[in-house]
Structure formats: structure tokens, C-alpha cells
Image: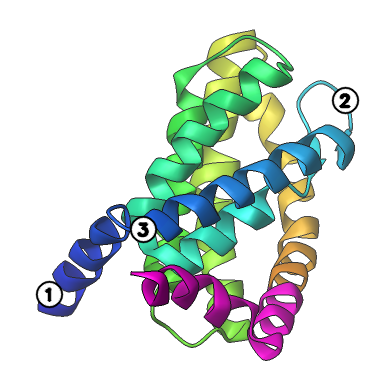
């Protein structure tokens, strides 16, 4: 319990660091670019995108509290830049919840494929399948059970793909020293 409390406090303290805010701004810019050029809409209720990767990097580097706030602000900014439907706070909540979950799994932990798979599975089940489907049902009235099979299939197919993608990018950035550079650059300047 104490370790979890410390993780949340440490993550919240990351927000006081100017370099954290600068790195989050760079990751937000990258996410906005990926959202504009690297997303594929498959029908009105299924979208495949890569703009979540910078979010997960922020969660890994700065933890659940900073990641949660980063994801919430970024979701709203993404909507105003490129709306793809009506604004609905449920989707912003989902982005924040997913970031919180990823932050709890990744922050100050060794990045392993097993950890990424489990974190992604939790997010897929709670956020993508249950909550997103519920929000789509509330918005469009298509029926939760009517939307569910297509969303489950898409998420089960994308779960290992997205896990491998984030794990590969994360391990590459870790091995090249990019994560270390991003975490320590601002602290040395202070």
C-alpha cells in the first residue's frame, strides 16, 4: 500500500518539473501528428490509430497521475483539432483511465513483454470493450450487445499487435538511452 501511495505522489511531483512538461508537450505534438496521419477508420464505430503510443511513453516516464492528466488534456485538444464525432466526456474519461492503468503498470517498473501484455489486456477489457462500447451505445443508440461482438473481435486482434508495437518501441528507446535522456535532461539543468 505504501509503495502504491509513493508511486502516486512521485508521479504527481513530476508535474512540478519543467522538463516533464516540455517532454509531455513534445509527446503531445507527436500524438497529434500520428492522430492526423496514422489513423484508419473501419466503419463508424471502429478506429485503428497509433496516437496512443506517445501517451503510453508519458505513462511509462511520468506515472499514472501525470499520464492521466496528460491524456485528458490531449484528448480534448485532439477533438478540437480533428473532431470525428460529437464531443463526449466519456471518451476523455477513458483516455485518462487508460493512462492511469498504464502508468500503474509501467512507472518505475522494468518494461517486459508480459507486463505490457497484461496492461494492454486490462485496458482492452475495461476501457476499449466495456466503457467505449457503452459510450457508443449511449451516443448512437445502436445497442450495447449489437456493437460488442465487432469491438471484442477488433480489440482481441489488436491486443497482441499493439502490445508488441509498444514493447518494441519502448525497448528500442530504452536501449538507445532516449528514456534516460528524457528523464534526466531537465534535472541536470536545475
Q: Which SS class for mark 1?
A: loop
Labelled pair 2, 1 in contact (Cβ < 8 Å): no
Residue at point 59% right, 43% down? 128
Magenta-highlighted stretch: main secondary structure? helix
User: The N terminus is located in which quarter?
Assistant: bottom left
Q: Tell which circle, 3 or 1, labels the residue nearer the N-terminal end.
A: 1
| Image-based side of 117 in relation to 104, left or right | right
Residue at point 44% right, 50% down? 21
Tell me, for residue 1, which label it has, or none.
Answer: 1
In front here: 72 or 188? 188
Task: Please name the residue that numbered disc 3 is placed on.
Answer: 64
Which residues fall within the magenta stretch? 167-190
Q: Which SS class for mark 3?
A: helix
Q: Which SS class for mark 2?
A: loop
Q: Position of residue 125 (x, y in %)?
A: 54, 52
User: The C terminus is located in which quarter?
Assistant: bottom left
Q: Tell which circle, 2 or 1, labels the residue nearer the N-terminal end.
A: 1
Tell me the CA gap for discs 3 and 1: 15 Å
Taking the image as drawn, is residue 172 in sight? yes
Task: Please name the residue that numbered disc 2 is placed on.
Answer: 43
**Colour option used:** rainbow
From the image, state whether disc 2 or disc 1 is nearer to you. 1
Residue at point 31% right, 60% down? 14
From the image, state whether disc 3 or disc 1 is nearer to you. 3
Residue at point 29% right, 62% down? 11
Amino acid at each position: 500500500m505504501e509503495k502504491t501511495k509513493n508511486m502516486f505522489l512521485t508521479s504527481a511531483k513530476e508535474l512540478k518539473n519543467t522538463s516533464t512538461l516540455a517532454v509531455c508537450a513534445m509527446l503531445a505534438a507527436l500524438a497529434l501528428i500520428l492522430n492526423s496521419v496514422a489513423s484508419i477508420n473501419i466503419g463508424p464505430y471502429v478506429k485503428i490509430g497509433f496516437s496512443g503510443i506517445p501517451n503510453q511513453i508519458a505513462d511509462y516516464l511520468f506515472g499514472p497521475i501525470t499520464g492521466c492528466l496528460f491524456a485528458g488534456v490531449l484528448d480534448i485538444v485532439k477533438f478540437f483539432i480533428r473532431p470525428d464525432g460529437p464531443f463526449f466526456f466519456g471518451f476523455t474519461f477513458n483516455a485518462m483511465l487508460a493512462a492511469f492503468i498504464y502508468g500503474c503498470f509501467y512507472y518505475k517498473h522494468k518494461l517486459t513483454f508480459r507486463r505490457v501484455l497484461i496492461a494492454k489486456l486490462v485496458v482492452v477489457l475495461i476501457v476499449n470493450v466495456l466503457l467505449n462500447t457503452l459510450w457508443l451505445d449511449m451516443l448512437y443508440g445502436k445497442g450495447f450487445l449489437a456493437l460488442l461482438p465487432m469491438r471484442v473481435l477488433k480489440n482481441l486482434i489488436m491486443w497482441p499487435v499493439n502490445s508488441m508495437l509498444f514493447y518494441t518501441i519502448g525497448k528500442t528507446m530504452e536501449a538507445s538511452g532516449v528514456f534516460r535522456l528524457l528523464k534526466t535532461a531537465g534535472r541536470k539543468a536545475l
